[in-house]
């Protein structure tokens, strides 16, 4: 059965896409820790990030770096935090989280509930800074 993220890749469910190429896609988390929380995934469905082929893993990080640079231009923050947890969706993914303090990347904190319009505006702004 296709993962939630594969369904996004296949456009079976909507997402606020920030960027994509033939191998990777970045989209906003719909339940973000902070404004701009972005997920970066390979389009190929692989459950565990360290099961990716070495070149795919390194290319995923290079793709994520481009997104992080645009994200930092868009959302005022000190850093873009990077987290790989991999328990919530069985599809390799990287969390990019704008951070001003350590609590901003605390996955136990309450999630935000932005509107579709807010997410669309943020995604558009990040894309414009790529």
Image (cartoon, rainbow, N blue to C red):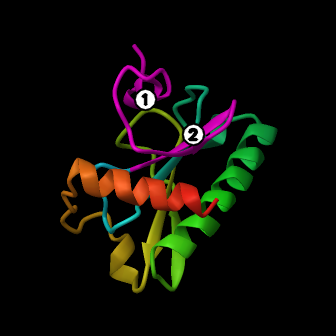
Look at 32% across and 54% down and name the residue there. Answer: 119
Mark 1 = which residue? 8
Residues marked 2 and 1 touching at CB (< 8 Å): yes
Q: Is residue 20 magenta?
A: yes
Mark 1: give few (<14), some (14-19) or many (20+) Cα within 10 Å.
some
Toward the viewer: 34 or 58? 34
Toward the viewer: 80 or 13? 13
Q: How many marks?
A: 2
Could you tell me residue 65's position as x and y percent?
67, 61
Res. 24 mark: none
Q: Quadrant of residue 114?
A: bottom left
Q: Is residue 114 magenta?
A: no
Look at 63% across and 68% down and name the residue there. Answer: 69
Could you tell me residue 91's position as x and y percent?
49, 34
Start-end of magenta stretch: 1-28
Mark 2: give few (<14), some (14-19) or many (20+) Cα within 10 Å.
many
Q: Is residue 58 above or below residue 12?
A: below
Left or right, 121 with reference to 61: left
The mark nearer the N terminus, 2 or 1, is: 1
Left or right, 95 with reference to 33: right
Q: Is residue 50 above or below residue 105?
A: above
At mark 2, the secondary structure is: strand
Question: Residue 31: in sight, yes or no?
Answer: no
Viewport quadrant of the N terminus: top left
Toward the viewer: 107 or 25? 25
Q: Residue furthest right?
A: 55
Could you tell me residue 97's position as x and y percent?
45, 66
Look at 45% across and 72% down and name the residue there. Answer: 98
Cα separation between marks 2 and 1? 9 Å
Mark 2 = which residue? 25
Viewport quadrant of the C terminus: bottom right
At mark 1, the secondary structure is: helix
């Amino acid at each position: 059965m296709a993962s939630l993220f594969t369904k996004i890749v296949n456009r079976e469910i909507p997402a606020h896409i920030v960027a994509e190429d033939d191998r990777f896609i970045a989209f906003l988390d719909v339940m973000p820790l902070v404004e701009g929380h972005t997920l970066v995934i390979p389009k190929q469905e692989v459950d565990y990030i360290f099961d990716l082929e070495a070149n795919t893993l390194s290319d995923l990080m290079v793709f994520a770096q481009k997104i992080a640079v645009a994200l930092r231009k868009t959302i005022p923050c000190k850093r873009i935090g990077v987290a790989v947890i991999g328990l919530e969706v069985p599809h390799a993914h990287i969390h990019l989280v704008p951070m001003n303090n350590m609590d901003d990347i605390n996955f136990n904190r309450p999630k935000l509930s932005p509107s579709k319009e807010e997410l669309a505006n943020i995604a558009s702004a990040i894309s414009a800074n790529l």
